[in-house]
């Protein structure tokens, strides 16, 4: 197995699932049972007996791989594959078609729609196991590479590019699932003075300390922290109502303070952060811009009312 001393990389490597999530889609339960016998001991096997069910599952809890029947009443396998590939949230999930009617035309069509492989029924357990394993390995490697591209080189948290990519996805999810979404924007207080006083090398160390403190303070896997620019960071917290986000922000503020990084040119004599919090209730339409602007306004408020504190406001969007 791969190993690394870099804590961020180690964290990413450990995120490769030990028991991958496999979704089997087939209108015949007997076929699902066969796959369950083949994969049950190595994978978490989930099932869907219709195309629509498969799409809903993939959108709410994306699996690591999908084994997809072609011939199904209603939405057929080709349509399901096309829909999966057109959604940014599901387009990276590898799809393997499993079908009794293999011909070159069908297989070509499936591959053109974005499937990674084509397996014929009745399946040979060893063959299907080997092919799934290959695709799972490729998937976890490409996930890892993708994530490395999205890390901030200085602090090891995600970079702005990743945040820009995830924001619309999380906003779409919150509107669709009617769940709350919170955003915390935080900024190191008197950072320019810190650099002037201690030099840029210490400034970099200070940013790393703050970033690490924030990352370690967010415990849920879906929580995301990104360096937004300069000395500014953003935390995106799915499924988090406003009150919880305020409590989390207060914890972040306290935890940075507890690092006791000396800052003689700060009103507090140590490094502190100011935080702006906003959250949506899920029932309203909202834009990424509004979410960022509202958090930024609250951050500005925190700066203007003394720094080293949290300000927040619920975002009320228009009814969709
Ligand atoms: Mg079928």
Image (tube, rainbow, N blue to C red):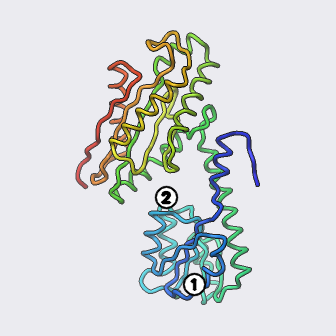
Q: Residue at x 61, y 18 (%)?
A: 200
**Is 137 in front, or is 111?**
137
User: Could you tell me which quadrant the N terminus lies in?
Assistant: bottom right
The verdict on label 2 being within 8 Å of ligand 1 is: no
| Location of residue 259 in the rendering, given as x and y in whole percent from the top left corner | 55, 24
Q: Which mark is residue 88?
A: 2
Q: Is residue 228 above or below residue 94?
A: above
Q: Residue at x 73, y 74 (%)?
A: 130
- Judging by the rendered image, the residue that carries numbered circle 1 is 33
**Is 175 in front, or is 264?**
264
Mark 1, mark 2: which one is toward the viewer? 1
Q: Is residue 9 above or below residue 192?
A: below
**Is 204 in front, or is 11?**
11
Mark 2: which secondary structure?
loop
Q: Is residue 274 above or below residue 126?
A: above
Left or right: 82, with 37 as reference point? left
Mark 1–mark 2 Cα distance, whole angstroms, equals: 30 Å
């Amino acid at each position: 197995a791969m190993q690394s001393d870099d804590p961020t990389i180690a964290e990413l490597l450990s995120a490769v699932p030990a028991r991958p999530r496999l979704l089997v889609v087939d209108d015949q339960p007997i076929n699902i049972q066969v796959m369950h016998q083949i994969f049950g001991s190595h994978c978490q096997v989930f099932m869907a007996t219709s195309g629509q069910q498969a799409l809903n599952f993939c959108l709410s809890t994306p699996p690591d791989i999908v084994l997809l029947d072609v011939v199904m009443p209603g939405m057929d396998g080709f349509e399901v594959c096309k829909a999966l590939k057109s959604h940014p949230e599901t387009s990276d999930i590898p799809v393997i078609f499993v079908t009794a009617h293999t011909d070159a035309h069908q297989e070509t069509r499936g591959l053109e729609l974005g499937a990674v492989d084509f397996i014929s029924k009745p399946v040979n357990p060893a063959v299907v196991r080997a092919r799934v394993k290959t695709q799972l390995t490729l998937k976890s490697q490409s996930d890892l590479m993708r994530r490395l591209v999205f890390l901030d080189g200085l602090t090891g948290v995600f970079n702005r590019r990743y945040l820009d990519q995830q924001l619309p996805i999380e906003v779409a999810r919150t509107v669709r699932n009617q769940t709350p979404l919170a955003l915390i924007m935080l900024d190191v207080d008197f950072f320019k003075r810190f650099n002037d006083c201690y030099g840029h090398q210490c400034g970099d160390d200070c940013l790393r300390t703050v970033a690490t403190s924030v990352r370690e303070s967010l415990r849920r896997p879906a929580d995301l922290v990104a360096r937004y620019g300069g000395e500014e960071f953003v935390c995106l917290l799915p499924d988090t109502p406003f009150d919880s986000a305020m409590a989390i922000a207060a914890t972040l503020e306290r935890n940075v303070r507890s690092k006791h990084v000396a800052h003689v040119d700060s009103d507090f004599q140590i490094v502190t952060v100011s935080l702006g919090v906003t959250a949506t209730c899920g029932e309203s339409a909202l834009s990424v811009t509004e979410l960022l602007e509202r958090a930024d306004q609250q951050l500005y408020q925190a700066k203007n009312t003394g720094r080293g504190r949290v300000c927040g406001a619920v975002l009320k969007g228009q009814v969709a």
